[in-house]
Amino acid sequence: MKICRYDDNRFGIVRDNVVYDVTSVVEAELPAYRYPLPMGDQLVANLEAMRPKLEQAADSADGKPIADVEFRSPVANPTKIIGVPQNYEEHAQETLVDAGISHGQPRRKMEDQGLFLKASSALIGPSDGVAVRFGDRRTDHEAELGVIIGREGSDISYDDALSYVSGYAIAMDMVVRGKEDRSFRKSVDTYAVLGPWLVTADEIDDPGQLDFVLTIDNEIRQQNNTRNLILNLQGQIVWASKFYTLHPGDIIMSGTCAGVGPVKPGDVMHLEFENIGAMDVPVRAHDVY
């Protein structure tokens, strides 16, 4: 199942490039909450329980072509967005030769760097567009597989890791280059893109074997396969859960490959991910809406 959030906070099931409106089911089936709200994204937390009614509603719902839809992030309220640094060897190598990426900082092993966090306030959907915050500094694209946690877990075992995944989406870990802490530079508003929808885990036989590509103006900037991750998805979940309790809707951005590069207002980043789909992400200046 592919579920999306679109337009003015509508919810849809995507089938054959058509979005079928199932907002009424979400509104009727999500429990009523009072402050303090439970941790995590409650759509994701209740997705499996709602799924039969969502599928049934989509069978008779009004449809809208995906070309006519503005996609928001399929996750609205993660407790955290977790990043994995330099998780493709060729990207780790390019940071050594491109001073615009490394700013003279020496390479450190992933296990020495640790995972990092992006502010949840940076999260947007593809149609919202990336707003370049600092025109005098380099902002880079980083295409990644987004892993969306489906249930609470801590100290998760390797064998059980993928059972904690609700689904997958295309992710972009945007970054402004500089010498400041990585989490600081990656938490700029609009610098965490997720979309265009959540594909439930049962739809993807092997998330560790997915081709992906990012192009701008038909020029391939990044192209790889998730089989080339240094630390695979199971290992990422295990590592993250040793330090954090994972909650429904938490997002792991699993690492980017070689080819990262700067974007400018007016660019449109086109991303395609095998078994997930495609999305266009426009780039604009910070003060242009």
Image (cartoon, rainbow, N blue to C red):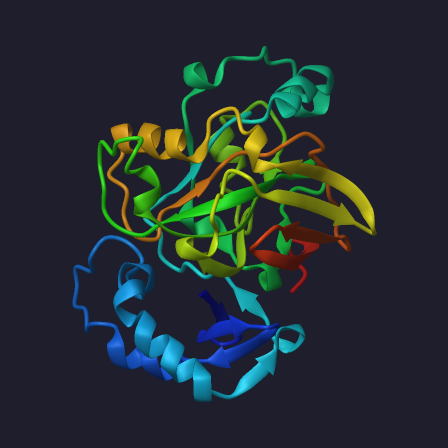
- Extreme residue toward the right, this view: 218
Note whether 138 is above or below 286 in the view shown: above
Residue 197 in sight in this render: yes
Between residue 148 and residue 217, name the one nearer to us: 148
**Observer-nearest of 154 and 75:** 154
Percent x, y for residue 83? 46, 35
- x%, y% of residue 267? 76, 52
Residue 122 falls left or right of residue 88 = left
What residue is drawn where x is 47% and y is 33%? Answer: 183
Q: Nearer the viewer, residue 141 or 276?
A: 276
- Residue drawn at x 75%, y 39% is 221
Q: Residue furthest top?
A: 106
- Residue pictured at 31% horizontal, 52% vertical: 150
Q: Quadrant of the N terminus?
A: bottom left
Numbered disc total: 0
Give how far across and how far down residue 146 sits, in percent: 49, 46
Q: Quadrant location of residue 91? A: top right
Q: Is residue 46 above or below residue 81?
A: below
Name the foreground residue: 16 vs 74: 16
Left or right of 265 on screen, residue 249? left
User: Considering the image in quadrants, where does the C terminus appear?
Assistant: bottom right
- Please say whether residue 26 is visible from this viewpoint: no
What is the quadrant of residue 138 in the picture? top right
Residue depicted at 77% across the width and 55% down the height:
266
Q: Check the image and name the residue furthest to the front.
A: 205
Query: Residue 282: x percent and y percent?
Result: 69, 57
